[in-house]
Amino acid sequence: MTKDTQTGQRPLRVAILEEDSLKAAVLLDGLREAGIADVEVIDTMTHMLRRLSTIDPDVIIIGLENPSRDVLEQMFQVSKLVSRPVAMFVDQSDESMIQAAVEAGVSAYVVDGLRKERVKAIVDMAISRFKAFDRLQRELAAARNELASRKIIERAKGILMRTRQLSEAEAYALLRQTAMNEKRKLAEIAQSVVTAASLLEK
Amino acid sequence: MRAGFIPLLDMAVLVATEEQGFARREGIRLQLVKDVSWSNIRDRLAFRQFDVAHMLSPMPVASQLGIGSNPYACFTPFSLGRGGNSMTLSLDLYREMQAAAGLDGTEDALANALALKAVIERRRRSGRKPLVFAMTYPFSSHNYEFRFWLAAGGIDPDVDVMMTVVPPPLTVDAIAARAIDGFCVNAPWNMIAVEKGVGRIVATKADIWPSAPEKVLGVSTDWADKNPETLSRLIVALDAAARWCDDPDNHGCLAHMLGDPAYVGVSPDMILRLLKGEITVDPGGRTRSTRNYLMFHGQAANFPWLSQARWIYSQMVRWGQAAYDEACLPRVEAAYRPDIYRSALAGSATAVPAVDSKVEGAGSTPTVVPATDGDLIPDPDVFIDRRAFDPSDIPGYVSGFAIRANESVTAAKYATGPENRRLVPKQST
């Protein structure tokens, strides 16, 4: 007998183990949009076990970068009532989904006996949200870098204008020419100018 | 080749294999990839993100027996060495033990376990909460060693204390925050806890069983079937690297390599002291010199003994992780592959044992092991409880332990049908 037939089609309860609140929110949104309303986020690992027993989820979603996966592993071992909770990975019939999950950095634990199609929707959603979050992070990092570069180039230009009596356009052209000659990034050359100037000032 | 690892000193052989050119000499490039959990190591090996991995010695046995949440078949043809683990208790707890049992700090591991027992009794009488002890993974040498040590002192790890998991890099913080009262983990975390003034080392792996395997090279069965030649060359490279790691002249260089943030990322000075076996056990400055605290090659440390795989199984049975079943023994032995080790190193300078099994912990009169270049005389090898392990009698060995899981509970647990399965246990108390 499976849990499905036991309980009818009661909505699945999902627990998300994630310390990064932004990432948890992205995941939570995705699941809600997919019609899974019964989702709890556990954002602190301190009382993880107690929280999990209270929530009693059908599916646990946890990122691969979370060291607490080993804590879950132990919990499944010591429990006297659980015989063997099942990681999503055990049913290897859908290898491409598992591969995608590992690549996206998601893992899931699923109660034994649940119908695969019901879980698949959840795991697929988790995969796509993890990927989206990753992309977001990368874009954010790129934007921050870009901003930092622009600031440092402004400062380098200012230094050159002051010390070598150049116009803004000339200062910029000098930086660019140097970067091209040395095959380095404009921001790197600007950083060198700023560092050198700070050494000379003292 | 991609090799996953967890930042611990017992990964030394893998680092030396790549950094000292032993891999290159065999036409291999080893790309070492840091990871955060043993569960990840297992899953990434299963799903081919890793070709081989730094693994806990019981993990291949668990995988072959189908226990754990992703029991994907893997095995080990090479142990990465011995030693490095210690049991560290919070300094407060150790002070309680000193008061209860009059310890002056020179006591051995067994005396410390007995003193802990006295403290646990006292705490129980005064209605205090049970102590919480951490190890790193349910199928780990740390779990079995911590339990072995506790039980040798008359403490039942499933009744008298709470055993939990804390990932290695978090153990020191956990003890400092009083979330746990003690832990068992590999170097360097024990000594870091001591140096931060929050922990006291009360036992080392060698006190419990000197020749116990620690980490192993985990290989997925699929990959090995497709790449037997590469695996063989990797074993040759690992063997040469392990020999290099054991040479005290190389310890300075090894400490620098391991200290790199890409690997373990702690001070090379501390690593060097650990490699020399000079351990600070007490924040007061008491040190202990342990010969071969970490051993990478000598004493056939890399040989995957079938008797050691069987010992691991005996502990799984002892603590109720598996029910004893003679039909499982071929699977237990499929986890350790001395045959692959032997064929890779045939004709090399390394003395390879000619037998696959031996009595473990045979005592101060060592059993002579016939090997390729004459006999191998192992160092005296005794378990802390002085009982030897005869690999042909696992049930007898397990039933000889006064403290062990109840067999009928274990049997019932494994007979439970899927309809009773729940993802999360209801709190039992």
Image: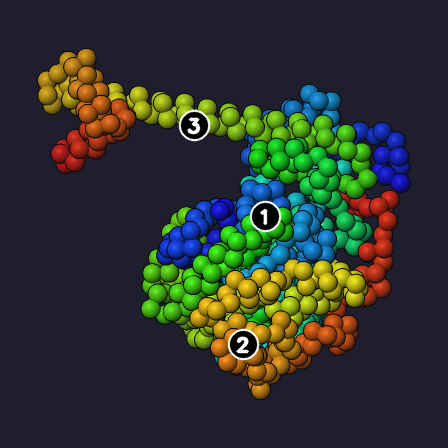
Tell me the kind of residue under disc 2. Answer: Ala
- The answer to whether one can see residue A175 in this image is no
Q: Which residue does the numbered mark 1 point to in the structure image?
A: B226
Tell me the kind of residue under disc 3. Answer: Ala
Q: Which residue does the numbered mark 3 point to in the structure image?
A: A141
The extreme bottom residue here reads B365
Snapshot quadrant of residue B354: bottom right
Q: Which residue does the numbered mark 2 point to in the structure image?
A: B371
In the displayed structure, would residue A178 be above or below residue B142? Answer: above
In terms of secondary structure, where does tag 1 sit? helix
Q: Residue at x 62, y 78 (%)?
A: B361
> Which quarter of the figure is the N terminus of chain A placed in?
top right
Residue B226 placement (x, y as % from top left): 59, 48
Tell me the kind of residue under disc 1. Answer: Lys
Residue A145 as seen in the image, left or right of residue B317: left
Tag nearer the camera, 3 or 1 = 1
**Crowding near the residue tagged with mark 3, few <14, some 14–19, many ≥20 C-alpha atoms within 10 Å:** few
Q: Residue at x 74, y 75 (%)?
A: B393
Q: Residue at x 69, y 77 (%)?
A: B390
Snapshot quadrant of residue A12: top right
